[in-house]
Amino acid sequence: MKISQAPAERPTAVLVLADGTSIYGHGLGAAGEAVGEVCFNTAMSGYQEILTDPSYAGQLVTFTFPHIGNVGVNSEDIENASPAASTAARGAILRADVTSPSNYRAQLDLSAWMRRRGIIAIAGVDTRALTSLIREKGMPHGVIAHNPSGRFDIEALQKRAAEWAGLEGRDLAKDVTTLQSYPHTEKGWEWDKGYTQHDGSGPHIVVIDYGVKRNILRRLASEQCRVTVVSATSSYEDIMEKNPDGVVLSNGPGDPAATGEYAAPVIRKLIENKVPVLGICLGHQMLALAAGAKTKKMPQGHHGANHPVKDLATGKVEIVSMNHGFTVDSENLPANVTETHVSLFDGSNTGIALKDAPAFSVQYHPEASPGPEDSFYIFRRFIDSVRPAAA
């Protein structure tokens, strides 16, 4: 497929795919090169949250919405909670140049912010054509190169993209998790109040950080929970020393089968001891693996804030935020696992519950950020399951 792009009199950036496709444009953010898996995100807002979501580690994000950067960025809407995940997405691919921000919360323009965070970006790309390529052929490996001089070694860039190992078989949770446990007290954003603090009362929830988004923690605090975050590599004994009333398995990047090698045995012990568990995104896949299910790579993944999901128990359809390139194989679920939600885009699994333990999970992001708030009830359902244990 031929990829066209907005004309650039003097290209300062290029996106080179492993098959040799070269797309020129204008460089933004940091100068240099970024290699990764090229995906697309269909959200119309929340670009700052997307670029700081640790689930995007190892990926170059193509924004299908053409106008990115209009509201600038600020110091509050950053999703990575751990300093280890200071850079989540490796790069950004945009249709239009970034304009001056127009929003009362803006503190910096997007390009300057990306430069500070080391995110390499290219603008002027025909993102519709690139998205069509990804839908037809799957997520390719690619390199974004940003050089103000406009000089590029295309052959070397293609070789780098072709030789990149990819995400399959890679455990990236260890790269983005916290190195030590910590409490979280910040609640969700409210109009005219901003982010307020929880008083530390309520059920104690331990969150296993595989790359947790800050708004998952905020949502738990907003539900009047006391929250402690622990490392992805924490043992069962480490977790139980915290005396949790429930455990949340967070989102995160990489191949779930690789992370599951050390995470699934820990989760299995939680299940066996009837500890209430909620899994989100990668955490959903971790719960499935612990229960004996399998995961597989998706051709194009699900990335956006407008995905329809059906709750099989109620028949209700929710519009949700998603970000994942692997999925739970719904064709081979163990007998003790019930499928609870499915994607109405492709029928893939988006939720499970265990029949013999107080544990359930969803593939999507119920905390939104960005995205609709249709699924906040997931947190309330989890807290309801926790409260009897906390009593």
Image (spheres, grey):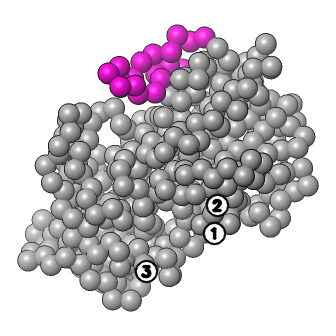
Compared with residue 282, is residue 148 higher up or lower down, i.e. above or below? below
Q: CA distance from mark 3 to mark 2?
A: 22 Å
Residue picked out by circle 3: 133
Label located before the other in sequence (1 or 3): 3
The amino acid type found where label 2 is placed reads: Ser
Residue 53 location (% of width, % of height): 45, 46
Along the line of sight, the residue nearer the viewer: 239 or 71: 71
In percent of the image, x 45 and y 16: which residue is there? 197
Residue 225 location (% of width, % of height): 61, 20
When asked about the image quadrant of residue 270, the answer is: top right
Mark 1: give few (<14), some (14-19) or many (20+) Cα within 10 Å: few
- Region rendered in magenta: 178-201
Q: Secondary structure at mark 1?
A: loop
The amino acid type found where label 3 is placed reads: Leu
In percent of the image, x 43 and y 61: which residue is there? 41
Q: Is residue 21 left or right of residue 348?
A: left
Is the C terminus in the top left, top right, bottom left or bottom right quadrant?
A: top right
Disc 1 and disc 2 in contact, CB within 8 angstroms:
yes
Mark 2: give few (<14), some (14-19) or many (20+) Cα within 10 Å: many
Residue picked out by circle 2: 343
Disc 1 and disc 3 in contact, CB within 8 angstroms:
no
Label located before the other in sequence (3 or 2): 3
Along the line of sight, the residue nearer the viewer: 350 or 179: 350
Residue positioned most to the left: 9
Along the line of sight, the residue nearer the viewer: 151 or 93: 93
Residue picked out by circle 1: 346
